[in-house]
Amino acid sequence: MSGTPSSATLAHQRAMSMTRLLDCGMEFADAQALFQRTSAGEEWDEVAESLAQAQLDRAAHAAGAGCHVTAREAQAAAIADLLFAQMAFNHDNARKRALYDRLVGATQQLCEWSEGRMTRVEVPFEQSRLAGWLVRPRARQALGTVLVFGGQSGWGVAYLPIARALAKRGLATLLAEGPGQGETRMRQGVHVDVNVEAAYSQFISFILNDATLGQPGIWGNSVGGLWAARTAAADARIRACCVNGGLAAPTLLPFRTFAEQAAAMLGTDDEDAIRSNFERMSFRPTRDRIACPLLVLHGGADPLVKLEDQQPFLDAAQSADASLKVWEDGEHTIYNHSAERTAFVADWFARSI
C-alpha cells in the first residue's frame, strides 16, 4: 500500500459516494471502512470483498445459532458489499464475473432464509432469459407489484432496500436485470441492442401471470428511467410509472465511467455505435405517450441529469395524475435523501397501482 489513493480509487469514490453506498444497503461501518482503507491505498474491490466476507461469516454464524433475523440482515449487508466490489470494473473481465457470481450466490442464500418471501426469477426473452429477484410482502396477496431496475451500474439487488419499503406497504417488488445488466448481460449475453421495452414487458407478463401479485407498476432509476418511460408508453397493462433521474435523450457523457459502462451494456467500444443506439432508444413525447399515472423525480444537484433532460417524460403524460418531485440539493437519483425518496415513491405506488 502506498498510503495514497490512486486515481482509480478517487474515481470509484466519486462514482460510489457514501450516500450511494448507504442508499443501496451497505452498513455505515462498512462504507466508512471502504473509504478509509481505499484512501490508504488498498484496492476497492479487495476491500469491499473482504467486508462482504466478514458479513457472510457473521450471517452463517447467526444462522447456525438460530438467530434468523440477524442472519438475513448480515447477508443483505454482504450483498451490498459485493454489489460495490464488482462495480469497481465496468467491463466484464474475469474478476467482475467472479464477484458477480459471488453476489448471486449470496442472494440465493438470502432467498433460502427468507421463508418464501424472496425468490429468483428467470423470464424468457427471444432466445435467452432475463434475470431478477421477486420480493413479496408478508401477506400472500400483494396489493400490486412494482418492477424496479437501475441503469448502467446499479442492478437487481441494488434496490433491495426499496423492495423492503414496498413490502411494508403490502406491495411486491420484482428487482429486474434487464438488457445490458447483471446476469442478463454477463451470463445470457443480452445487451441493449434489443427491443428494451419488449424485454421489460416480459417482466410485466410474469407479474400478471401470477394472481397473487396484483397489478404492475414500473420504477426506473438513472438511465433505467428512460426504459421505464418507454415501456409504460408501449405497454398499456402498466398501472403507474416512476422515472427517477432519467435521460429522455441519452448521449455519451464526458465521464470515463459512464462511457465504459455504456460500452459494456452494448457490447462494443465503438463510440459511433453507442451514440446510434442511444438515439434509437431516445424518448420522444410526440411518439411516446404515457397513459398511466406518472411520477418524475429530480435532484437539483444531479451532475448527470438536468431538469430539462426529464421534461419530455412529463410532456408525454396523458393522465391527470402526473407530477414532478424535486429535491433542490438532491444528488443523482436522490441518493442523499434516500429514505424520504423511497417512502414518498412507495406511498405513491400504494395509491396509484
Image (cartoon, helix red, strand yellow):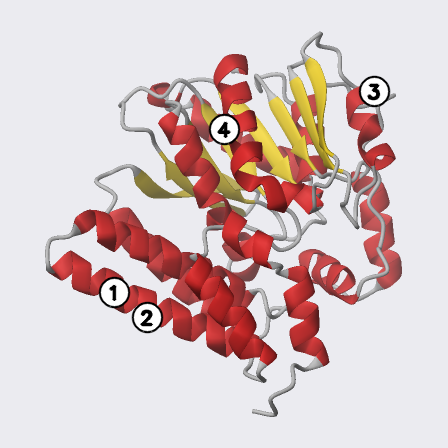
* Left or right position of 286 against 281: right
**Residue type at the position of mark 4:** Val
- Gap between marks 1 and 2 measured at Cα: 6 Å
Measured in 3D between alpha carbons, the distance from the residue under mark 2 to the one under mark 4, in whole angstroms, is 32 Å
Assign a secondary structure to mark 4. strand
Task: In the rendered structure, find residue 54 and report the number of the disc placed on it.
Answer: 2
Is residue 91 depicted above or below 292 in this figure?
below
Q: Position of residue 301 (x, y in %)?
A: 77, 45
Q: How many other residues sit within 10 Å of disc 2, few (<14), some (14-19) or many (≥20)?
A: some
Q: Quadrant of the N terminus?
A: bottom right
Residue ID for mark 1: 58
Q: Residue furthest left?
A: 65
- Identify the mark at residue 146; answer none if there is no mark: 4
Front residue (pair 71, 243):
71
Q: Are marks 1 and 4 in contact (CB under 8 Å)?
A: no
Q: Are marks 1 and 2 in contact (CB under 8 Å)?
A: yes
Residue position marked by numbered label 3 in the rendering? 315
SS category of the residue bearing label 2 = helix
Q: Position of residue 125 (x, y in %)?
A: 54, 41
Q: Is residue 3 left or right of residue 119?
A: right
Label 3 vs 4, first from the N-terminus = 4
